[in-house]
Image (cartoon, rainbow, N blue to C red):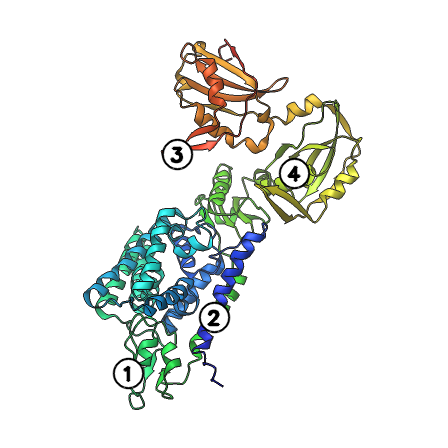
């Protein structure tokens, strides 16, 4: 019976397969489970280090960055100093796949190793890419690496953060480079590889950072670009001239020349193609401490780690570092933004109002929107947001503002018509309830999905209170307030969006139901629920209002809150005609659209034709022009009102 072939370096292969298996599971579940939203960069140390840099420079975190990523980045830095680039060798999916692809090149004898001057010059590319990536991440608070990262493009199916042509080029270079050139991505293009090489030259890295912090401490206004450039340039210079780190990493592959048989198996096994068989200590900058050379060595105790039989050390260290990063991340949450604008406020007057559960605070953009809203509140002097826990902290001058005022400003009122009452229902009942856990726009949306499932409920409004005062409009012949209460307090709700069904946990509680039930007319309900839209353009304010006519036509879809965002696209479409100057909606006996235009310069029928185009021509802020499907339909032509604006 033939002997079973022994698996070499089982610790490394196990970790690599675990990572690839986890990614495969995430991709598969993404396609079969509409409620599953995988974060394919949840443990990405490079994204975490970029986010930490953004936080350090701007007091803000890049969108979607978490403490897990940040601490994974920090333990990667520690790991690089102690053990070299363990992430690259044991965890990185690109590193694993390019190793596998390299075997194809070896099988057909088409894979080569670049040496000499060309090798040293090409190493500059990853430092250039590192500089560009970190610069655009910090200045935009968006992870620039997502735009081109071949890993992220593949696992997300070229998701919305990916720039298609960037990713296609990076993917082609990575795949072809892996087949024809040994570890082309890792050696020459990977910005994380450049960063870990900088960490292994920790003395130089720390020196630049200390000088930068020293200048900042003494009030020198110096951009982060300078230390970033210095680290990138010096990192490349040291790598290109020395091809080895200075002092670090602490643990290295060592060879005992007295027992070495010079078989050369270690050189063949090295994924990076390093010369192991002729050196006493492997100090090359490309060594990842993968341990493949140690695993294949036939001579006992010849290849070791720091002259000790510690072949288990790299895989164990990788697992331990990951566990440390996860442990630290579980107990610490960094603010997504940390802004202060009331520096003249006496310290003894500054108090903090904190509120959790604000689902609308979910990224850098929504955090900045929240901060801009709070800046307009007299007495508020700063904010912090924490997107993972959906928490905000508002710093305020207690001599100028009360916490309840802040809470009222944060609150988002809602006004939603779920269904228009049938024509035969001429009267609608109204009941007021006190609802707990309904505070921001997301809460209101989930609340609307609950009520939408109740036959006989037509809509609701909410206004600030503790608890929030919610007015529900319903048909008492079909449903009773107690049945509505029971539905509201359900533990979860399901809804369908864009063909997918989602289920979310909800925690609404009904604190009270008013004893009195009022009655209003169907027409009054619809009119009260209507939200008008108004936008002027093409120099409307400069035109003599006596020279403006109004084209008015029925617009039932103006009652649909889901189409409110599409209104701006419709306006962009009709504003292509320079003589069309205003668009608004209003409700009298029914919803109407009014299009204002200059008399004698626009044919009314052309407006009706433009409104019914199958596609809308949309002009974006960046100057681009696009086509989107027209969600509106105007079935009844309008009339021209020869009136000037009141």
Q: Which mark sits nearer the N-terminus, 1 or 3?
A: 1
Q: Which mark sits nearer the N-terminus, 3 or 4?
A: 4
Q: Nearer the viewer, mark 2 or mark 3?
A: 2
Tell me the distance, in whole angstroms, between the alpha carbons under discs 2 and 3. Answer: 46 Å
Q: Which mark sits nearer the N-terminus, 2 or 3?
A: 2
User: Residue 382 location in percent, x, y?
Assistant: 48, 45
Q: Mark 2 points at which residue?
A: 15
Q: Mark 3 points at which residue?
A: 621
User: Residue 444 location in percent, x, y?
Assistant: 62, 39
User: Residue 557 location in percent, x, y?
Assistant: 58, 26
Disc number for residue 171: none
Disc number for residue 280: 1
Q: Is residue 529 visible?
A: yes
Q: Which mark sits nearer the N-terminus, 1 or 2?
A: 2
Tag 3 secondary structure: loop
Tag 4 secondary structure: helix
Which quarter of the picture shows residue 633?
top right
263 or 458, which is in the foreground? 263
Q: Which residue lies furthest to the front in this view?
A: 1
């Amino acid at each position: 019976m033939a002997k079973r072939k022994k698996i070499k370096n089982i610790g490394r292969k196990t970790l690599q397969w675990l990572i690839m298996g986890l990614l495969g599971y995430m991709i598969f579940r993404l396609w079969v489970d509409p409620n599953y939203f995988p974060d394919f960069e949840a443990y990405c140390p490079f994204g975490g280090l970029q986010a930490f840099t953004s936080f350090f420079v701007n007091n803000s975190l890049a969108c979607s960055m978490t403490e897990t990523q940040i601490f994974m980045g920090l333990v990667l830095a520690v790991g690089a100093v102690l053990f070299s680039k363990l992430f690259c060798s044991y965890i990185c999916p690109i590193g694993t796949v390019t190793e596998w692809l390299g075997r194809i090149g070896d099988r057909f004898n088409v894979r080569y190793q670049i040496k000499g001057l060309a090798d040293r010059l090409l190493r500059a590319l990853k430092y250039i890419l590192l500089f560009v990536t970190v610069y655009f991440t910090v200045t935009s608070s968006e992870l620039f690496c997502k735009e081109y990262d071949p890993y992220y493009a593949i696992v997300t199916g070229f998701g919305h953060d990916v720039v298609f042509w960037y990713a296609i080029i990076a993917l082609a270079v990575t795949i072809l480079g892996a087949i024809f050139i040994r570890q082309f991505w890792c050696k020459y293009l990977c910005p994380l590889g450049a960063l870990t090489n900088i960490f292994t030259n920790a003395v130089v890295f720390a020196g630049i950072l200390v000088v930068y912090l020293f200048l900042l401490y003494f009030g020198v206004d110096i951009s982060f670009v300078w230390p970033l450039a210095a680290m990138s340039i010096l990192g490349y210079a040291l790598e290109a001239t020395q091809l080895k780190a200075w002092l670090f990493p602490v643990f290295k592959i060592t060879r005992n020349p007295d027992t070495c048989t010079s078989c050369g198996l270690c050189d063949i096994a090295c994924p990076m193609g390093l010369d192991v068989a002729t050196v006493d200590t492997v100090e090359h900058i490309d060594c990842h401490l993968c341990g493949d050379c140690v695993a294949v060595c036939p001579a006992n105790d010849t290849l070791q780690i720091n002259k000790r039989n510690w072949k288990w050390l790299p895989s164990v260290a990788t697992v331990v570092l990951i566990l440390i990063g996860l442990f630290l991340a579980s107990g610490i949450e960094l603010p997504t933004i940390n802004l202060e604008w009331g520096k003249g406020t006496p310290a003894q007057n500054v108090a903090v109002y904190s509120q959790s559960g604000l689902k609308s605070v979910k990224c850098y953009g929504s955090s900045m929107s929240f901060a801009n809203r709070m800046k307009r509140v007299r007495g508020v002097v700063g904010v912090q947001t924490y997107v993972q826990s959906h928490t905000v902290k508002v710093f305020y001058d207690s001599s100028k503002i009360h916490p309840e005022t802040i809470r009222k400003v944060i609150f988002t009122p809602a006004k939603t018509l779920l269904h228009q009452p049938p024509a035969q229902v001429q009267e609608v009942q109204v009941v007021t309830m006190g609802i707990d856990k309904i505070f921001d726009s997301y809460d209101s949306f989930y609340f609307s999905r609950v009520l939408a499932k109740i036959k006989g409920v037509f809509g609701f409004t909410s206004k600030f209170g503790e608890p929030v005062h919610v007015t529900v409009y319903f048909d008492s012949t079909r449903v009773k307030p107690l049945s509505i209460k029971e539905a509201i307090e359900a533990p979860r709700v399901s809804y369908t969006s864009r063909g997918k069904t989602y289920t979310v946990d909800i925690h609404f509680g009904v604190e009270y139901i008013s004893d009195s039930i009022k009655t209003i007319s169907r027409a009054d309900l619809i009119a009260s629920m209507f939200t008008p839209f108004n936008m002027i353009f093409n120099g409307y304010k400069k035109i003599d209002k006596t020279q403006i006519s109004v084209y008015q036509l029925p617009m039932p879809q103006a009652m649909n809150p889901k189409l409110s965002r599409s209104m701006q696209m419709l306006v962009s479409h009709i504003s292509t005609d320079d003589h069309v100057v205003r668009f608004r909606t209003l409700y009298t006996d029914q919803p109407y659209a009014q299009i204002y235009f200059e008399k004698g310069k626009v044919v009314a029928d052309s407006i009706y034709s433009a409104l019914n185009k199958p596609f809308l021509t949309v002009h974006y802020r960046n100057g681009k022009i696009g086509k989107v499907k027209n969600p509106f339909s105007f079935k009844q032509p309008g009339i021209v009102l020869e009136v000037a604006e009141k």
